[in-house]
Amino acid sequence: MNEIVFKEEIAPDTFRYQIHHPKIARKRKAGQFVILRMHEGGERVPLTIVDSDPVAGTVTLIFQAVGHSTRELAQLSVGDNLMDLAGPLGKPTHIENFGTCCVIGGGYGTAPVLPIAAALRDAGNNMIGIIGARSWNLVILEKELRAICGRLEVATDDGSYGHHGFVTDVLKSIIDEGTKIDFVLAVGPSPMMRAVSNLTREYGITTMVSLNPIMVDGTGMCGGCRVEVGGETKFACVDGPEFDGHLVNFDLLMKRQATYKPLEQEAAGRELHCKLYPAD
């Protein structure tokens, strides 16, 4: 249980793992996540379930090695075991036939978009996809999303691949060309989700976003993942992680996300060392 059976680096410092956990593989639905812990005293890391194979009993996770814990996770190999893998957590995505859906992934946020896009397609929706990254080498899951979406557009901040600009530029262009979009899902950095929500508000397009606040226990007890939606306090781990993008207080969300930034930078700066030996 919790054994890493597959590991692949799909972009610089971005990894795809398959973990053996038959119960989660059977029960998970699009939009849900797990919380993993590598060892006693390790940080609890929430990650969206990107895919699962109920027959093989595996769940697929994608993460970026950007902080101390995710860098440590990236050092594990096939055959290693995680100490804990709790899930599936969170509410599954509400899936129905909306008509034409546009799914938008920014950076690592493209990973959570993938299973939702597949579920929306299977419900009979016409699928449009937009994915963005800072540069060409950071674009992920393009092939997988092209297999799901009838139309997929790629945007890069530096113009090294696809459209030169932001995902919102591409979305506005699609809308302005006369394409009727009935539903938008956006996942990525908070500024990107806010920009998408501000744009779709102008056109009256229903928009859902998947929030990524600070999270600890994943059960709603710690209160660390509280967010403000429509003037009410919600807990992303049990009430979400998806919410109406037009009602989210993104300013408050980003302020809370930055609470522990100095400590995260300090931890990320520490050199990882072999667990068998103490640091010098």
Image (tube, rainbow, N blue to C red):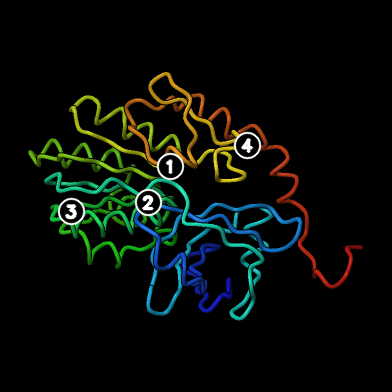
The residue indicated by pointer 4 is: 222
Given residues 71 and 134, the one toward you in this image is 71
Cα–Cα span, label 3 and label 2: 17 Å
- Horizontal placement of 127 versus 228: left or right? left
Which image quarter holds the C terminus? bottom right
Q: Crowding at label 2, few (<14), some or many (≥20) Cα neighbours within 10 Å? A: many
Secondary structure of the residue carrying numbered label 3 = strand
- Closer to the N terminus: mark 4 or mark 3? 3
Cα gap from disc 4 to disc 1, whole angstroms? 16 Å
Q: Residue at x 84, y 73 (%)?
A: 276
**Which is more foreground, mark 4 or mark 2?**
4
Query: Which residue is labeled 3 in the image?
Result: 127
> Looking at the picture, does residue 231 appear above or below residue 171?
above
Residue marked by disc 2: 31
Badge 1 element: loop
User: 212 or 258: which is nearer to us?
Assistant: 212
Which numbered disc covers residue 241?
1
Count the numbered circles shown: 4
Disc sitting over residue 32 in the figure: none
